Each structure stands twice: as C-alpha cells, then as structure tokens.
Image: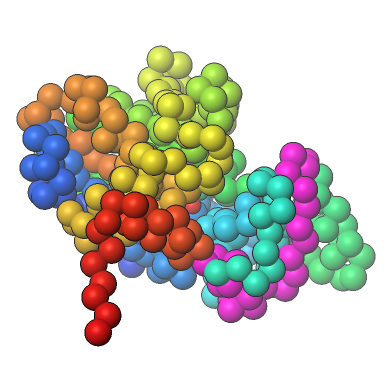
C-alpha cells in the first residue's frame, strides 16, 4: 500500500497520540484499553473527517475548484471540518443540511451550528430527512456554476474511496505507533456511520497484512445495511489503493447501541460520556463516540476480550456537539443526585 501516490494536503500535526486508559481499564477489570486521540488535530477541534479531507481537499484543489459543497446532519462535525479546511485553503464552502430528526434544525442553535456561522459558511440549504443528498448537492452545484463558480462536491461524511484513504493512513499510523510502543493491539473499536473510517481502517490493516479485528459500533443503520455499506466502501478503497480485498467475515458491525435512532440519546451513551469524563478527563460526544464507547463497555461486559488483551478505542472527535446536549446531562445528574453545587 503506497499512499504517497496520492496528492494530499496536511492538516494534522504529525501522529495523533495513543494513550492507555489506566483508570477506565482498572475500573472494568481489564482488558487494557487504549485510546487513539483523533479528536486532537488541526482545523477546528479535530475529528475523523480531518484525515479524509487531507485527500479530498487535495483532489478539489488539483481540479482547480473554488467552492466546496458538502452535506450532513444539523450538528454535523463533517460539515464543520470541511468548512474549516475550505477556510484554510481560501475556498468558499456551501453546506446542505439534512433535518434527519423532524424540526431539529434551529438556525441559532449551539455546537457545530454556531461554528458554521463563526467559520463563515457561504450558504446553508436545509432539506427534509430522507432527501437524496447527492441530488440536492448537485442542484446547488448547478446553480453555483451558473454564477461562474467551480464547485467540488464532497459526499456525506467524506466517505468515498478517496476519503477512506485517510483512515487507511490512520491504520498505518496505528501499526507504527504499536511497534514503537511495543504493544500489539488485539482489537480496534470505532463508531461506524457513513463508513469511511471503518472501511478505511479495514483497508489499511489489510494493506499491511495486519489481521486486527475492527468492531464498528453503528450509530444509525441496522447491522445488515451497515455491513453492506462497509463491504462496498472497503472494496472501492482496496481497489483504489491496490490492496487485496477485505474478507467479508472481517466486517463486524454492531447495531445494539444505536438506540431509537441517529443522534437520539441512549442511557448507555450518557453513562459512557460521563464515565470517560470522570475517569479519564476525556470528552466524548453524544452522537458517535459516546455510543461507540457504550459499545466498547458492552463488549467488555459480555466478555468479548480477555483481561490481558489490548483494545484500542478510536476517538473520532465530535465534542462540540456535546454543548448542544447539555440539558440531557443536567437532567441525568439531577436524577442521580450528583449535581454538586452549593450556592450560598
Ligand atoms: C462522522 C463521525 C463519525 C463516523 O465516521 P464515519 O466515517 O462517517 O463512519 C464518528 N465520530 C464522529 C465524531 C464523527 O463526526
């Protein structure tokens, strides 16, 4: 696997750290849990889309684009990071926002929505849930083209074969770090959404003959739908990167942590976000990493790993969305009677 063949912009400051989660591991009675801090990167607040954007923005620039169009949900980290990358490159950026939960778009809401405006978005088009997002972006592209712009469309989540190359690069980075640390990882756990992260990791490990199981914790889809999505993306990424195909039985997608739906809270997510903050001082997010960590906790509790194994949790970012969910956490602490404020 030779990633140097692809044009790439650089938004990371070298490798993101891998840290042992000593207190969490101790609390659970093993396995040895490590975290890869892909929440710590360049651009605004970091997150997994940054790795994909290194390749996608390079392609946009090589095609002489002057405007980026992309899409996402109302609190999309992908939209925030794509916009930040466009700002850095001196390009305009137009967002198409899908209201996946009816009436959930509040133009003045906090979190990533606030950051869209702070970062100077060129335009936001809000469309109802279930809209064909590629068609909606193409419509925007046509109207911008009529006005003389040269748009480049990045698919939702930056998840196509080229975006997945960013996570094949991450797999390579993880193997280098494991070698340097003298640690061998027995499993990787990550959130599985639009799929570029999960399929890119599988592709990258395959490209290095590293047979590390990757557990994708679904954040939206049932297992059969997500497995098919990951299989298709991994096939395309393997073809692009000239890597032998990923085995079908290596694709593990777990849907029991999704709860009522994408971005909708679960008790397990609240527990996981709370636990990581209070045991490790690390902020997760309510839509992706909170549910992914609930998945890791679930796997540990059902005995999926032995106590001496090394498990790597991929922190894919997203903490700005946390600030759009604060009432949920205050209610939880109030119910638990752990709101430790005394006002005199
Ligand atoms: C987009 C996103 C994911 C999911 O990654 P995919 O490549 O879309 O599967 C996970 N975590 C965060 C914080 C994200 O923003």
Q: Could you tell me residue 52's position as x and y percent?
A: 50, 52
Seen at 32% across and 42% down, the residue is: 293
Write down the quadrant of residue 318 in the picture: bottom left
Residue lying at the far top in this picture: please name it.
249
Q: Magenta includes 250?
A: no
Name the outermost residue toward the right: 146
Q: Nearer the viewer, residue 114 or 136?
A: 114
At x 73%, y 57%, the residue is 96
Judge left or right: residue 264 versus residue 96: left
Whether residue 180 is visible to the viewer of this picture, yes or no, is no
- Position in image of residue 170 (x %, y %): 35, 47
Q: Which quadrant does the C terminus fall into?
A: bottom left
Q: Quadrant of the N terminus?
A: top left
> Could one spot residue 229 in this view of the protein?
yes
Q: Position of residue 225 (x, y in %)?
A: 58, 23
Query: Residue 267: horizontal and vertical position, in percent?
Result: 39, 41
**Is residue 130 rendered magenta in the image?**
yes
Residue located at (42% from left, 67% from top): 45
Q: Which residues are magenta?
A: 111-132
Q: Nearer the viewer, residue 274 or 296?
A: 274
């Amino acid at each position: 696997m030779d990633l140097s063949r692809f044009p790439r912009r650089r938004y990371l400051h070298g490798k993101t750290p891998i840290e042992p989660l000593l207190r969490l591991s101790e609390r659970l009675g093993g396995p040895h849990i490590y975290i890869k801090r892909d929440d710590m990167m360049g651009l605004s607040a970091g997150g997994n889309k940054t790795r994909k954007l290194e390749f996608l923005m390079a392609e946009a620039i090589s095609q002489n684009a002057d405007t980026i169009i992309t899409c996402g949900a109302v609190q999309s980290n992908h939209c925030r990071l794509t916009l930040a990358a466009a700002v850095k490159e001196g390009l305009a950026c137009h967002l198409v926002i899908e209201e996946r939960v009816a009436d959930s778009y509040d133009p003045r809401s906090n979190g990533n929505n606030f950051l869209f405006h702070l970062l100077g978005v060129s335009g936001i088009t809000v469309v109802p849930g279930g809209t064909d997002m590629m068609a909606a972006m193409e419509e925007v592209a046509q109207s911008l083209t009529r006005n003389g712009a040269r748009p480049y469309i990045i698919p939702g989540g930056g998840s196509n074969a080229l975006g997945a190359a960013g996570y094949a690069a991450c797999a390579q980075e993880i193997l280098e770090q494991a070698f340097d640390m003298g640690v061998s990882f027995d499993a990787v756990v990550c959130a599985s959404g639009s799929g570029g992260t999960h399929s890119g990791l599988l592709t990258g490990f395959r490209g290095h003959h590293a047979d590390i199981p990757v557990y994708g914790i679904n954040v939206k889809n049932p297992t059969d739908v997500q497995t098919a999505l990951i299989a298709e993306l991994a096939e395309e990424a393997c073809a692009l990167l000239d890597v032998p195909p990923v085995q079908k039985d290596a694709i593990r997608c777990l849907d029991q942590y999704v709860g009522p739906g994408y971005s909708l809270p679960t008790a397990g997510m609240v527990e996981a976000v709370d636990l990581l903050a209070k045991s490790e001082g690390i902020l997760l997010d309510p839509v992706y990493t909170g549910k992914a960590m609930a998945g890791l906790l679930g796997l540990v509790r059902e005995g999926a790993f032995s106590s001496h194994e090394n498990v790597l949790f991929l922190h894919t970012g997203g903490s700005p969305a946390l600030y759009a969910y604060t009432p949920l956490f205050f209610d939880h602490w109030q119910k638990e009677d752990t709101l430790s404020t005394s006002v005199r």
